[in-house]
């Protein structure tokens, strides 16, 4: 069995989602099959006889279904082991998956074993019994008592009691024994209630497109008032494990191919710069080829929905997150509303294939930035700071977004003029003005001017006024635009619109400024203005004129619209019939368009001219960045792409899960569009050896998620393929669109339906808990962990401050524990700065705050197996204790139940024993509690002592 299933089941198989719609209607495009009565039952045994008369058996029951078509057993469930008890009561129940529907003819075989040790390797057969689901449903009180037959079919090894799960009070009894004379409870059956289905997801039919192959477990635990609660765990795979990385790879390829094309369009460069350009383009070509190969390999994979840890170092899967799963614990208590708790588990986002010999991203990027200046000297490049590079990327992205948008809005303005619609033309003009103003202000930066000059110096035949002046210095001493004066004088919010006469003069000036650079051979298309004649000195003021022309052209358009509307208003005044007829015949609706068309066309041409010049300038800046970073920068970019891909897949999974769960919660939806959600990543990596590199990768990957926003869209159709989340954008900014069926989309708040970007605030807290962390804390350096926790605490605190200012606290969920969030934050802050070894309180408090803030919870370790499962199960039992009054006598037993459901296949696939790994073949560590997380096993303690001795000897030599 693949790794990922260790949280939930023993001998599990994939399961499909059971519908909660008894009529089998079609809701939101997802066909809901008629709901069959879901059967969940508990097990107990009486009078078991062990192989040795002087001992009591350690009993467990394996449950199998007899396939009526193939006539063979399908084993898919197993109870926990109840030690030394001839009358065991099992807390782990059985729930039927949908591919084995519980029809009355379904045959179930129960096999009881005596596990002489917890590895089950020396288990002995005690007996078996078979019954049909119809037998259980027809039985009195829906309870069967079956005799266990030995292998010879003659001897009786005891009895097994099968009871359909019910809710209600039970008498206080010895939990290690079952009494058959407990009065039957006439309470509603849990399994017959549609709202209590194991995979019901609150009647939400939307899990189909994203979540699949649910694996379910059911338990019954006793509360402090001697009642019984039902606890259902449901783990699912997420299709986004593969779909998000594949989409990102396509976007990376598209972006890099566009970058190569931009470099080609820089025009003729001097030999030195041309050689650098060729080398950079070769590097981009290598990345594109590599990503295309990876994408082709991923396209060949079908059916799989997650990457097991045994494949974490496989190159073709390096963009795929490890063991990405969702897990929901649903709690049903007597006379209380059901509660559910979600968590996403995933292996640490890191470049496992590339390795960690030289560290992770955080260290590599820091070293790279410090060395980049020396690279620029060696390659004779212009050094641009990371801020300048980021600004260049921002300008390119904004231009790519706004230029087609402005062109589209300009066409809408002309269409409104064609229709002679005063309201339409006003609205179109307002939108056009807003976007043009944003466009102009984006380019209001000296970086563009200095980069244009630098590009000019890189062309053949460059002539400078001052040969001693470097390109960067020249850019710093150019003529400046007054920074306090907006070039968009006629925009709303600026000075009043100019008169029509003034606008004509301005438009003529714009025309003249554009034709001055076309030469005497007649006007050329604007796109040919990219190269300045080499025999002339560079005109440092040209960019100011070109840039300001956009605002001037817009002013002309605004003035013309005002003129047309004034004329229209004057013509609507009372007039003699003959004069009115003359007006109607002399002014047809097409006049508006005819008068506006030249001005709008000129505006679009000016915008295009600015885009072409600025695009080349910013491309030249990025060329310096790329040339200075050969080959380190390209390798780092590939590593960053890999890590970000894994992190985004996990975030998209968590966001979608949280959205589906909170669709009907008005307070949550209000919080979503007003502030956004916090995404809390809990990491259990040590700060020792290669896991330091993993943590350094993870820190950068989680931080890069700040560049992501979400949008909720209306799906084109209700087909499942159209409900898959989509990614768009570039490396500096990505948008994840989550489509919803039309009927569901219509219930959302207006702000969300209008496409408002929804923000997510990722925070990362790390506390190493394994034996390697013990070595790190004694002999190593944990400053990385301390810095991460301090930085992210400040981010979490800032998020809460913003949330409390914009959203009433009544919108947040209610919990039994009434500790104030401010108090929790203060406690977390104190723990972050406290020097304490393996301070798991940081993780506990951060997780609690996340749930209180309607956030998304993630838990990670190296492979999302051992340490992750220990953390998740401990958190679940703590929630049962704190929120649902789990009896203290059942806490350890509940923990053991959730942790004992590991298949031998899982155990065999664990490549690396992680801290506190509790399996059936490790009885010493079975009773696991927070302190036990920090203990070192005996053989590793010997290793630690040897290392300590070596360290001391080296110190005193």
Image: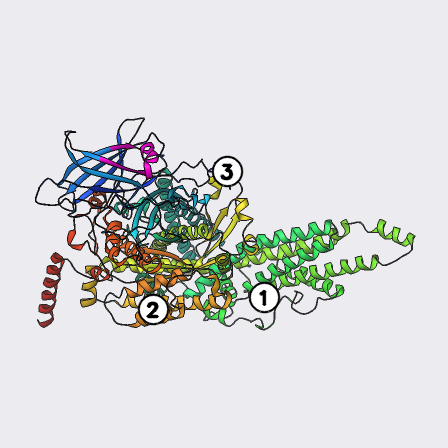
Q: Where residue 115 appears, x then y in whole percent?
A: 15, 43
Task: Identify the mark at residue 544; answer none if there is no mark.
Answer: 1
Viewer-side residue, 73 vs 778: 73
Q: Residues within 10 Å of mark 3 (few under 14, many from 20)?
A: few
In this view, the mark in front (3 or 1): 3
> Could you tell me if residue 800 is visible in this image?
yes
- SS at mark 3 in the image: strand
Task: Identify the mark at residue 26; answer none if there is no mark.
Answer: 3
Q: Residues within 10 Å of mark 2 (few under 14, many from 20)?
A: many
Viewer-side residue, 810 vs 309: 810
Quadrant where the N terminus is found in the figure: top left
The quadrant where residue 501 appears? bottom right
- Please count the marks in the image: 3
Q: Which residue, given by chain and number where applicable, does mark 2 sit on?
A: 828
Q: Residues within 10 Å of mark 1 (few under 14, many from 20)?
A: some
Q: Does the magenta segment cover residue 140? A: yes
For this view, does 452 lie left or right of residue 485? Answer: left
């Amino acid at each position: 069995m693949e790794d990922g299933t260790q949280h939930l089941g023993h001998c599990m198989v994939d399961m499909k989602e059971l519908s909660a719609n008894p009529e089998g209607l079609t809701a939101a495009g997802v066909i809901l099959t008629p709901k069959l009565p879901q059967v969940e039952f508990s097990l107990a045994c009486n009078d078991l006889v062990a192989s040795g008369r002087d001992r009591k058996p350690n009993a467990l029951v394996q449950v199998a279904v007899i396939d009526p078509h193939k006539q063979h057993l399908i084993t898919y469930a197993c109870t926990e082991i109840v030690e030394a008890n001839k009358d065991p009561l099992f807390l782990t129940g059985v729930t039927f998956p949908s591919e084995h529907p519980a029809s009355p003819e379904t045959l179930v075989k129960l096999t009881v074993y005596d596990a002489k040790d917890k590895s089950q390797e020396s288990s002995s057969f005690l007996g078996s019994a078979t019954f049909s689901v119809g037998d259980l449903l027809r039985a009195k009180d829906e309870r069967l008592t079956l005799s266990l037959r030995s292998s010879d079919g003659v001897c009786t090894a005891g009895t097994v009691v099968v009871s359909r799960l019910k809710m209600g009070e039970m008498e206080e009894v010895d939990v290690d024994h079952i009494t058959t004379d407990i009065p039957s409870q006439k309470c509603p059956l849990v399994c017959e209630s549609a709202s209590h289905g194991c995979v019901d997801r609150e009647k939400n039919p939307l899990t189909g497109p994203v979540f699949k192959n649910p694996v379910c477990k059911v338990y019954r635990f006793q509360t402090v008032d001697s009642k019984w609660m039902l606890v259902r765990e449901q783990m699912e795979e997420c299709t986004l494990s593969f779909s998000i990385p594949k989409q990102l790879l396509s976007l990376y390829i598209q972006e890099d191919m566009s970058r190569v094309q931009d470099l080609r369009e820089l025009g003729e460069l001097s030999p030195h710069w041309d050689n650098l350009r060729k080398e950079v383009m070769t590097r981009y070509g290598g990345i594109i080829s590599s990503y295309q190969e990876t994408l082709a390999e991923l396209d060949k994979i079908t059916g799989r929905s997650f990457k097991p840890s045994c494949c974490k170092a496989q190159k073709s899967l390096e963009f795929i997150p490890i063991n990405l799963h969702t897990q929901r614990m649903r709690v049903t208590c007597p006379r209380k509303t059901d509660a559910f708790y979600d968590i996403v588990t995933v292996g640490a986002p890191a470049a496992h294939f590339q390795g960690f010999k030289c560290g992770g991203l955080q260290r590599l990027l820091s070293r790279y930035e410090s060395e980049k200046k020396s690279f620029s000297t060696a390659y004779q490049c212009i050094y641009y700071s990371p801020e300048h590079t980021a600004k260049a990327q921002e300008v390119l992205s904004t231009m790519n977004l706004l230029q087609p948008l402005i062109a589209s809005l300009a066409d809408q303005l002309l269409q409104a003029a064609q229709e002679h619609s005063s309201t339409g033309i006003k609205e179109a003009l307002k939108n056009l003005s807003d976007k043009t103003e944003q466009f102009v202000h984006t380019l209001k930066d000296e970086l563009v001017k200095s980069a244009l000059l630098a590009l000019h110096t890189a062309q053949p035949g460059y002539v400078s006024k001052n040969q001693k002046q470097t390109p960067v210095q020249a850019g710093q001493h150019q003529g400046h635009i007054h920074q306090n004066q907006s070039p968009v004088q006629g925009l709303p919010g600026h000075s009043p619109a100019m008169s029509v006469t003034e606008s004509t003069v301005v438009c003529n000036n714009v025309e003249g400024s554009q034709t001055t650079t076309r030469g005497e051979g007649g006007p050329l298309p604007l796109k040919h203005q990219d190269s300045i004649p080499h025999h002339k000195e560079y005109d440092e003021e040209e960019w100011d004129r070109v840039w300001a022309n956009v605002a001037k052209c817009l002013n002309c358009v605004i003035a013309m619209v005002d003129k047309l509307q004034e004329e229209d208003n004057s013509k609507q005044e009372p007039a003699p019939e003959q004069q009115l007829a003359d007006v109607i015949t002399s002014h047809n609706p097409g006049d508006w368009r005819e008068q506006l068309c030249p001005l709008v066309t000129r505006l679009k041409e000016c915008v295009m001219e600015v885009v072409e010049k600025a695009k080349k300038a910013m491309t030249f800046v990025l060329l310096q960045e790329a040339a200075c970073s050969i080959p380190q920068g390209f390798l780092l970019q590939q590593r960053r792409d890999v890590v970000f891909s894994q992190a985004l897949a996990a975030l998209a999974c968590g966001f979608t899960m949280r959205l589906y769960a909170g669709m009907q919660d008005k307070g949550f939806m209000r919080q979503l569009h007003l502030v956004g959600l916090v995404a809390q990543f809990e990491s259990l990596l040590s700060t020792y050896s290669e896991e330091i590199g993993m943590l350094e990768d993870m820190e950068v990957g989680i931080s890069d998620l700040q560049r992501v926003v979400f949008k909720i869209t209306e799906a084109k159709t209700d087909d499942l393929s159209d409900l898959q989340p989509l990614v768009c954008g570039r490396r500096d900014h990505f948008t994840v669109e989550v489509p919803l069926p039309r009927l569901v989309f219509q219930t959302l708040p207006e702000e969300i339906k209008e496409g408002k970007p929804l923000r997510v605030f990722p925070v990362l807290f790390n506390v190493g808990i394994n034996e390697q962390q013990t070595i790190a804390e004694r002999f190593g350096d944990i400053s990385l962990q301390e810095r991460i926790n301090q930085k992210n605490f400040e981010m979490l605190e800032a998020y809460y401050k913003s949330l409390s200012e914009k959203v009433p606290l009544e919108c947040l969920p209610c919990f039994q524990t009434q500790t104030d969030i401010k108090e929790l934050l203060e406690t977390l802050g104190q723990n972050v700065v406290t020097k304490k070894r393996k301070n798991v309180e940081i993780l506990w408090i951060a997780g609690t705050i996340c749930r209180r803030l309607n956030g998304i919870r993630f838990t990670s370790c190296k492979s999302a197996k051992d340490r992750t499962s220990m953390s998740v199960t401990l958190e679940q039992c703590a929630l049962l204790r704190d929120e649902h009054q789990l009896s203290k006598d059942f806490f350890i037993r509940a923990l053991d139940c959730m942790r004992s459901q590991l298949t031998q296949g899982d155990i065999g696939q664990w490549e690396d024993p992680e801290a506190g790994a509790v399996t059936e073949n490790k009885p010493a560590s079975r009773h696991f509690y927070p302190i036990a997380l920090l203990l070192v096993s005996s053989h590793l303690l010997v290793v630690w002592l040897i290392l300590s001795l070596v360290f001391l000897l080296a110190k005193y030599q």
